[in-house]
Image (cartoon, helix red, strand yellow):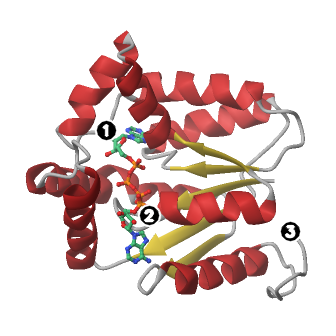
Amino acid sequence: MIGLIFGPPGSGKGTQASRLEREFDMAHLSTGEILRSEAAHGSPVGKEAARIMAAGDLVPDDLIDRIVESRLRRIEPGTSVLLDGFPRTIKQAQALDRMLAKLGRNVDFVVALDVPEPLLVDRLLHRAAVEGRADDTREAIMERMHEYHSRTAPVLDHYRRSGVPVAEVSGVGDVDEVLDRVRNALRGALHLPRYKPGAGGI
Ligand code: B4P
């Protein structure tokens, strides 16, 4: 099973993905986390990515595609994977389709989180105060929103056109409320019974 968690910056992709990973025993692959880890280690890729991320821009497609491909190859065949923050452009989505086809796999579902922009900005500014992430300045946040609308949002149509189930879920409310919605949307997309505590994974 290959799933994508999709949404604008601050919509809670990473927050929800880390919970789904545990609950459904999926490998969680976050391109944002991989890039931050490269940046923290000061690798050449990391230094370049850190500069781009701090400005709120998207890291070049080729670089991201290479990172994801090498990670996917390392995952044991048959393992369920939850991709978080990738693909973020149509080119990345096309590259992912090619990578998965080589592995005999495909995207099975997309869960898209929907949160109004003023709330996204508040969440990210709050995170800036708590964690001090370099890309959570007001200026970088505005650039990230712009990149999302112009380059990332069209990716959803790529999947709709390809017949992949896309579940749109409100990301407003506390983390557990959103998790309930995500879980049920995911089960709906996969034609599984709605969630009952203790009923098991995907
Ligand atoms: P990401 O790491 O994906 O960061 P994000 O979009 O800000 O985060 P996310 O939506 O996961 O929000 P989170 O759960 O943390 O990307 C960072 C950067 O990396 C990008 O801007 C780009 O430069 C680069 N990058 C990554 N992937 C790329 C790609 N494929 N191509 C090119 N460039 C790429 O939640 C945000 C905050 O809200 C947190 O503080 C959280 O605690 C809070 N929150 C979450 N859910 C909440 C809720 N329900 N209520 C209240 N607060 C909540």
Residue 108 percent across, percent down from the top left: 75, 58
* CB at disc 2 and ligand 1 closer than 8 Å: yes
Q: Quadrant of residue 115?
A: bottom left
Nearer the observer: mark 3 or 2; the answer is 3
Measured as percent of width and height from the top left, residue 154 is found at 41, 57
Residue for badge 1: 58
**Spatial CA span between label 1 and label 3:** 33 Å
For label 2, the residue is: 7
Per the model, the C-alpha gap separating discs 2 and 1 is 15 Å
Q: Amino acid at mark 2?
A: Gly
Is residue 163 shown to the viewer in this render?
no
Q: Is residue 109 left or right of residue 75?
A: left
The residue at label 1 has a CB less than 8 Å from ligand 1: yes
- Which of the pair 156/181 is nearer the observer? 181
Which quarter of the figure has residue 54? top left
What residue does disc 3 label? 201
Question: Counting residues from the N terminus, which is met first, the one under dot 2 or under dot 1?
Answer: 2
Side (left or right) of 107 relative to 9:
right
Could you tell me the amino acid type at mark 3? Gly
Give the spatial CA distance, label 3 vs label 2: 23 Å
Up-down: is 142 above or below 202? above
